[in-house]
Every structure is written in C-alpha cells, then in structure tokens.
Amino acid sequence: MILRGMLGYVWKISQGGQARWGISYKAADIVPAGGGWSGGYSTSTKTGLA
C-alpha cells in the first residue's frame, strides 16, 4: 500500500479523571503497491493544506 498526503493528529481527552491520548492518521490517497500509480508526488488540496 502507498499512502500519499499522510497526516497524523495527536489527541488528548480526560476520562474518569485520567488523561487518555492517541494518534489518528489520515491519508489523501491510498493506492495498492502493485500498480496503478506511476510515481511522483503531488500535494492534494482535499486536506486543506497548501
């Protein structure tokens, strides 16, 4: 699998007096590694990032 435009978000919440945290991941595109993608990288405006 090839992930393009990968972003990670750190989150933290308080639950029952304890702090919980984690990391959420988001990719603009997910492409099978076996083909269908000619290579190169282009930024995606879908994520709202320039």
Image (cartoon, rainbow, N blue to C red):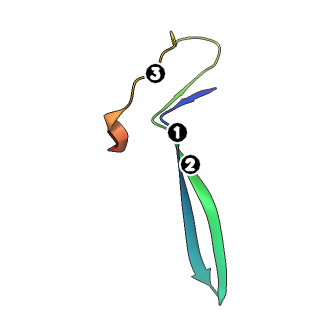
Q: Which of marks 2 and 1 precedes in the sequence?
A: 1
Q: At 57% across and 71% down in the image, what residue appears?
A: 12
Q: Which residue is mark 1?
A: 6
Q: At 52% across and 13% down in the image, what residue appears?
A: 39
* Picture disc at residue 25: 2
Q: Residue furthest bottom?
A: 17
- Contact, mark 2 vs mark 3 (Cβ under 8 Å): no
The picture places residue 26, in percent across and down from the top left corner, at: 51, 45
Q: In the rendered structure, which amino acid carries the disc numbered 1?
A: Met
Q: Marks 1 and 2, how far apart in space? A: 7 Å
Q: Is residue 4 above or below residue 12?
A: above
Q: Judge from the rendering whether residue 10 lies leftward or rightward of residue 28; answer left or right.
A: right
Q: In the rendered structure, which amino acid carries the disc numbered 3?
A: Tyr
Q: Marks 2 and 3, how far apart in space? A: 19 Å
Give the quadrant of residue 2: top right
Disc 3 crowd, CA 10 A, few/some/many (<14, 14-19, 20+): few
| Helix, strand or loop at mark 3 | loop
Q: Residue furthest front?
A: 50
The picture places residue 29, in percent across and down from the top left corner, at: 48, 31
Of the pair 14 and 42, the residue shown nearer to us: 42
Q: Quadrant of the C terminus?
A: top left
Q: Which of marks 3 and 2 precedes in the sequence?
A: 2
Give the quadrant of residue 35: top right
The picture places residue 45, in percent across and down from the top left corner, at: 32, 36
Numbered disc total: 3
User: Which one is closest to the eye, mark 2 or mark 3?
Assistant: 3
Q: Which residue is mark 3?
A: 41
Q: Quadrant of the N terminus?
A: top right
- Contact, mark 1 vs mark 2 (Cβ under 8 Å): yes
